[in-house]
Amino acid sequence: MPRLLLTLPVLAILFLAVSTALLANSFGPINGVTGAPGELNCSLSGCHSAHPANTGIGSVTVNAPGSYVPGDTLEIQVEVEHSGQIRWGFESTVLDGANLPSGSILITDTLRTQSSLDTVVTGREYAKHTSIGTDSGTVNSSPGWSFSWIAPSAGGGLVTVYVAGNAANGNGVNDTLDAGTADWIYTTSTTIDEAFVSVAQSDVPIPASEGFALQARPNPFNPVTRITYHLNAPGEVNVSIHDLSGRLVQNLTSAYQTSGDHEVIWNGSGRQGTIAASGSYLVSIKAAGESESRTIRLVR
């Protein structure tokens, strides 16, 4: 019977090939495993198939604003948790109501996240972890990942963010047989609706007799905008900036003011001196038990 002689160079090549096959997904999952319509997830694609998706004690969560204005840049955050697991991964894509790619993905943390594009079949774009972004050795939950989604300039209606997360045991092997120690896959999704901006919220001047005559000039703006308003009577006034999900970004003024015309400037900063990202915000005024808001757009 012939004997197979394996020289050291051959053994090295075989070891490299096997190691590459086993560890490839540590450097980022293959495209098309988010669980979105028409896609598999890693428990079905053969990557981590010991457990069906969403059958473990953990979870994947995705946080995103509830609405967008065409052209907005929105931050999306992903986290995975599973008690006892020590390595983590994710993949995400954004689709419109027809399950077609919507907008574009912007990677803001290139050390821990990356993007890829399926140019052959679907044209879908994906955000996913890098090798460093697997956070090997971090127990019970991932530090999380964040990336930005740029909404289409012409709008796209309701969009859905699909996410798959991997809670791994960190042994560097795709444990397809050992269900006791293998990796776990979780999937989820969230929707972002296109915000309706009425004419009253646009840059059309409003007579001083109507409401507070709240205006911002210029709009869109960079780096500052002048916010003007009219008070029919003196009293306590609050003028503030919120994002489209309702979170307070900056309080511009909170004081007793006389009747008449007033002005305040917003330079695009947050409450702790942070720099607000490009996108749409709401400037709101409250006085005498009444309130009014306008949409303003920061373009950096």
Image: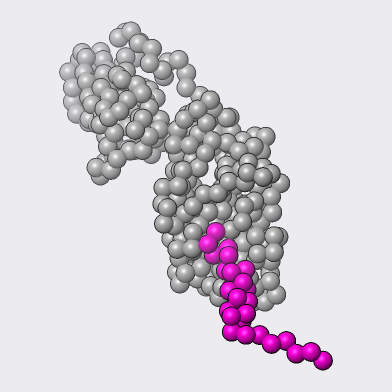
- x, y (%) of residue 26? 54, 65
Residue 116 place in picture, x, y as percent = 55, 49
Magenta stretch secondary structure, dominant: helix
x and y, in percent, of residue 239 in the image: 28, 28
How far from the left and from the top, in percent, is residue 21?
62, 68
Q: Quadrant of the C terminus?
A: top left
Res. 182 visible in picture: no
Q: Residue at x 50, y 57 (%)?
A: 129
Q: Is residue 246 magenta?
A: no
Identify whether 298 is placed above or below 52: above
Q: Which residues are magenta?
A: 1-28
**Does 12 appear in magenta?**
yes
Tell me, yes or no, if residue 125 can be seen here. Answer: yes
Residue 13 lies in what quarter of the image?
bottom right
Asked if residue 265 is positioned above or below residue 40 in the image, the reply reads above
Front-lying residue, 197 or 88? 88
